[in-house]
Image (cartoon, rainbow, N blue to C red):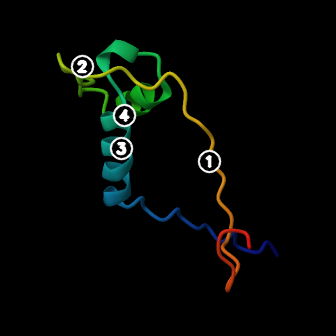
Amino acid sequence: MVKPTIVRTATPADPDDHVQVFVSARLRSSAAGETTAQTRLAQSTAPDVEPPAPAAAAQPGPRWVPAVRSAKAVRGRRGGR
């Protein structure tokens, strides 16, 4: 005798999560950078929505960003003494 197969359906996606992904990608995308990952992500989640045009007074992105490392403070010690 053949045992019946249990079929499980996927849990439907939460629309709020979809909106959050789209808005985050849209705010980081621009019409000037059509090949950026954020622009492609925004277009894939909402293909009918055009990426935002850069503002006339917008500053360019940073040329570089320094890495910052932080360490936990040791209780009872200040200034490395």
- Give 50 or 66, whichever is nearer the viewer: 66
What residue is pinned by disc 1?
68
- Give 33 or 49, whichever is nearer the viewer: 33
Q: Is residue 1 left or right of residue 43?
A: right
The answer to whether the residue labelled 3 contacts the one labelled 4, judged by CB atoms less than 8 Å apart, is: yes
Between marks 2 and 1 in the image, the one whose residue lies nearer the viewer: 1
Image spot of residue 81 (x, y percent): 74, 73
Q: Secondary structure at mark 2?
A: loop
Residue type (three-letter) at the residue carrying disc 4: Arg
CA distance for labels 1 and 3: 24 Å
CA distance for labels 3 and 4: 6 Å
Give the residue drawn at x 49%, y 27%.
37
Residue type (three-letter) at the residue carrying disc 2: Pro
What residue is pinned by disc 2?
54
Give the residue drawn at x 35%, y 44%.
24
CA distance for labels 4 and 2: 11 Å
Q: Secondary structure at mark 4?
A: helix
Say which label, 3 or 2, has the lower sequence index: 3
- Report the disc number at residue 28: 4
Q: Secondary structure at mark 3?
A: helix
Give the residue drawn at x 70%, y 73%.
4
Between marks 3 and 2 in the image, the one whose residue lies nearer the viewer: 2
